[in-house]
């Protein structure tokens, strides 16, 4: 199977020679270089979904910013293409090479540089694993302002490069707000040291913002300083069962009103997502009956009695008004974890299906489920859903409803042309018609770059190309991705 259909290697990029490898070995030592070892290179060449696969013969594992700088200067001078790689959990194929690009892995840059417990500002190497940082901060009564199902593997540098959203965005906002400073190695090796820890700094263009969400196309993020919130003393998680998406929206509106400052997450999934989870995970039913929709509400505050009372009042109101048909509140840490495990388990469950078409879209909340229903009808009419031997197994929906972000996943028995052509560009047209985004939080990578025009105007895309050329005139950073190539 051609994992990157339609792409051709850019022959302006140099092919790696033994001399290049000698240079990298002299810089990083034998352990910092993985060369022509198919077994060891497999993990660097293959993405989390096993959907995209490159053919790189060389992966580099620097330990310092100076080494990253020397690598980039060499590659830029020699016109060697480079793919920065973090935890390799990205879902759009951005972190793996297409051809023989060198993989620059940040996995050996994982030191915590400092923490100020007055301001809550953490400084760390880009290769620190998100969960490691979160646990480290937990000991000090703080937490990372972002959380995602991939926390055990993804790097903070990868999170910044993708501008990851995740499960805490509703409360703590996006990385564009919480990242205070970055250290970035530019494609020519220049170290841009902007490791600021200031909350307020209006001195010129805010350059760091350009790198947040730039997916390794204009520089390698090597260090980050980030504002971290206090870890809440009281955390509650409730699960609601609901009859309609209309009710999901009502529950959300009420949660903002009733739970206000203690509301920390509001996630939803449909029965199809739950069935998919149950198919692949050993789990105890969280509710006796089944409902078409589920909502996970989390509160985080500092006074348990106060929060319990607020949450109970909210749940009572939801049940009395028949917005929710059922509701359970986790009684201890284990139950909290098992409710979150359902929400965080859909991606892995879907990964066990023969094929998955993944979409990560944002749009006005009232439109979210209309999009899912419309897609089901469209695939049924198109003859690929609904019959025992259909190509499509199911259309499942879940997401960060509080952020207007839907994860629409189409599980299939195989990737086939007919199904692909029924989904794309139909879905992107649907999203554009409702002024949504074709990539809410996962980024563009190689999966969505050609469709950027559905979310951004030609003027904006041209300006993005200008920025790319300014930083990376040789085009060596993560080529073939992010911006449209056609
Ligand atoms: P990688 O996958 O290694 O790289 C992603 C991109 O960033 C690539 O383009 C790469 O070139 C670039 N890059 C990586 N590190 C650097 C660096 N140091 N400097 C420059 N460029 C770099 N995403 C969300 O937004 N929200 C979620 O809730 C969420 N949940 C997920 C759950 C699961 C189970 C999985 C598998 C993925 C999930 N993701 C989610 C997607 C993914 O985890 C995020 O995109 C994450 O931020 C990627 O981090 P990473 O370190 O794995 O980066
Ligand atoms: C999530 O919110 C992640 O669980 C992954 O962003 C979404 O699997 C997906 O499509
Ligand atoms: Zn998500």
Image (cartoon, rainbow, N blue to C red):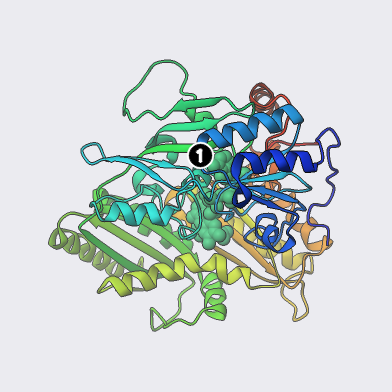
Could you tell whether 260 is left or right of 13 in the image? left
Task: Using the image as rendered, state which of residue 110 and residue 5 is in the foreground.
Answer: 110
Vertical relation: 112 (above or below) 319: above
Residue at left offset 17%, top offset 54%: 302
Label 1 CA crowd tier, 10 Å (few <14, some 14–19, many 20+)? some
User: What x and y, as percent, mark residue 126?
Assistant: 48, 43
User: What x and y, as percent, mark residue 435?
Assistant: 59, 40
Residue position marked by numbered label 1 in the rendering: 64
User: What x and y, as percent, mark residue 418?
Assistant: 83, 62
Task: Using the image as rendered, state which of residue 21 and residue 97 is in the foreground.
Answer: 21
The N terminus - image quarter: bottom right
Q: Can residue 273 be seen in this snapshot? A: yes
Task: Using the image as rendered, state which of residue 10 and residue 251 is in the foreground.
Answer: 10
Quadrant of the image occupied by residue 50: bottom right
Could you tell whether 401 is left or right of 172 in the image? right
Mark 1, secondary structure of its residue: loop
Q: Can residue 405 be seen in this snapshot? A: no
């Amino acid at each position: 199977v051609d994992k990157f259909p339609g792409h051709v290697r850019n022959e302006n990029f140099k092919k790696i020679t033994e001399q290049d490898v000698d240079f990298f070995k002299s810089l990083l030592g034998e352990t910092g270089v993985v060369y022509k070892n198919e077994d060891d290179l497999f993990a660097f060449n293959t993405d989390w979904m096993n959907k995209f696969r490159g053919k790189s013969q060389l992966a580099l594992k620097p330990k310092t910013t100076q080494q990253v700088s020397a690598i980039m200067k060499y590659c830029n001078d020699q016109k060697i293409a480079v793919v920065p790689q973090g935890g390799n959990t990205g879902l759009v194929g951005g972190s793996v090479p297409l051809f023989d690009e060198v993989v620059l892995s940040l996995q050996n840059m994982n030191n915590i540089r400092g923490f100020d417990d007055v301001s809550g500002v953490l400084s760390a190497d880009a290769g620190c694993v998100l969960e490691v940082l979160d646990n480290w901060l937990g000991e000090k009564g703080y937490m990372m302002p972002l959380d995602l199902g991939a926390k055990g593997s993804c790097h903070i540098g990868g999170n910044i490069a993708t501008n990851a959203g995740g499960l805490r965005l509703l409360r703590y906002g996006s990385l564009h707000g919480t990242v205070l400073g970055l250290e970035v190695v530019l494609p020519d090796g220049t170290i841009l040291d902007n490791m600021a820890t200031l909350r307020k700094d209006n001195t010129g263009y805010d350059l760091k913002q350009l790198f947040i969400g730039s997916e390794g196309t204009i520089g390698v993020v090597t260090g980050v300083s980030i504002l971290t919130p206090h870890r809440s003393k009281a955390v509650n998680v409730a699960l609601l069962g609901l009859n309609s998406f209309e009710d999901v929206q009502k529950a959300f509106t009420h949660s903002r009103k009733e739970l206000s400052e203690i509301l920390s997450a509001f996630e939803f999934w449909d029965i199809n997502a739950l069935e998919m989870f149950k198919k692949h995970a050993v789990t105890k039913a969280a509710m006796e009956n089944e409902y078409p929709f589920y909502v996970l509400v989390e509160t985080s505050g500092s006074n348990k009695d106060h929060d319990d009372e607020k949450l109970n009042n909210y749940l009572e109101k939801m049940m009395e008004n028949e917005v929710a048909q059922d509701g359970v509140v986790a009684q201890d840490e284990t139950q909290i974890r098992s409710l979150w495990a359902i929400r965080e388990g859909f991606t892995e469950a879907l990964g066990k299906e023969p094929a998955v078409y993944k979409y990560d879209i944002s749009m006005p909340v009232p439109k979210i489920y209309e999009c899912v229903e419309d897609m089901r009808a469209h695939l049924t009419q198109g003859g690929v859903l609904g019959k025992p031997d259909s190509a499509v197994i199911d259309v499942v929906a879940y997401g960060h409803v509080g952020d207007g972000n839907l994860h629409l996943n189409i599980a299939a028995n195989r990737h086939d042309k007919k199904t692909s052509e029924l989904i794309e560009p139909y879905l992107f047209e649907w999203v554009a018609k409702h002024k949504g985004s074709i990539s809410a939080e996962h980024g563009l990578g190689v999966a969505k770059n050609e469709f950027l025009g559905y979310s951004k105007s030609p003027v904006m895309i041209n300006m993005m190309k200008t920025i790319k050329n300014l930083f990376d005139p040789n085009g060596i950073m993560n080529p073939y991705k992010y911006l449209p190539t056609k």
